[in-house]
Amino acid sequence: MAPDSPPERNLPPQSVAGAPFWDATRDQRLVLPWCPACAAPHWYPRGFCPTCLSEDLEWRPSDGVGTVAAASVQPKPTERALGGRVPYAVALVDLDDGVRMLLQVVADDPWAVAVGDRVTVGWDPLPDGRHLPTAVAEG
Ligand SMILES: [Zn+2]
């Protein structure tokens, strides 16, 4: 890498169980693993339902709307490529679908992100064509 070239983003690792999720992010679609026996989604992707251990799972689209359950501000970048973004907020978001995800929050003022804020999924492009889901603050 040349000294003046921008640092590359770290690529999130992929698992077999999470492949449908990552494939959907290429089209900026949020899908969640669903257990038909429990009639409920779960997060994170894995080869079985964490409630009943069924391996008969489906993927269903999510509206990607939720509520901040906990928030924090990251003052230092977790990788060099994010150096221009600090400070930024990260939050545990309870999606209305019933799962909790850890997401970076896109907000004008990261310090103003608070428990109870409503957020909608957004997409942060990765160099390999996938996207990382983010939470975009409403208003
Ligand atoms: Zn289940």
Image: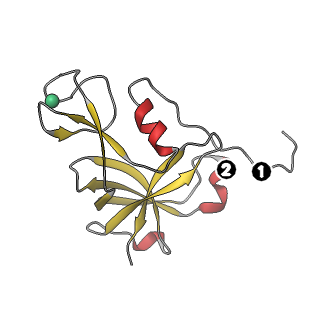
Ligand 1 location (quadrant): top left
**In the image, what residue type sits under mark 1?**
Pro
Decide which of tag 2 and tag 1 comes sooner along the chain: 1
Kindly indicate whether the residue at mark 1 contacts the one at mark 2 (C-beta within 8 angstroms). yes
Q: Position of residue 87 (x, y in %)?
A: 55, 64
Q: Quadrant of the N terminus?
A: top right
Q: Residues within 10 Å of mark 2 (few under 14, many from 20)?
A: few
Residue 99 appears left or right of 9: left
Position of residue 134 relative to residue 16, above or below, is below
Identity of the residue drawn at 48% across and 51% down: 28
Q: Residues within 10 Å of mark 1 (few under 14, many from 20)?
A: few
Query: Residue placed farthest to the bottom in the image?
Result: 139
Asked which quadrant contains residue 41, the reply is: top left
Q: Which mark is residue 81?
A: 2
Q: Position of residue 68 (x, y in %)?
A: 30, 61
Q: Position of residue 121 (x, y in %)?
A: 40, 58
Residue 81 appears left or right of 96: right
Q: Position of residue 64 (x, y in %)?
A: 34, 56
Q: Quadrant of the C terminus?
A: bottom left
Q: Which residue is mark 1?
A: 6
* Element type where label 1 sits in the image: loop
Residue 128 appears left or right of 139: right
* Element type where label 2 sits in the image: helix
Identity of the residue drawn at 50% across and 74% down: 108
Position of residue 98 relative to residue 56, above or below, is below
Disc 2/disc 1 C-alpha distance (Å): 7 Å
**In the image, what residue type sits under mark 2?**
Ala
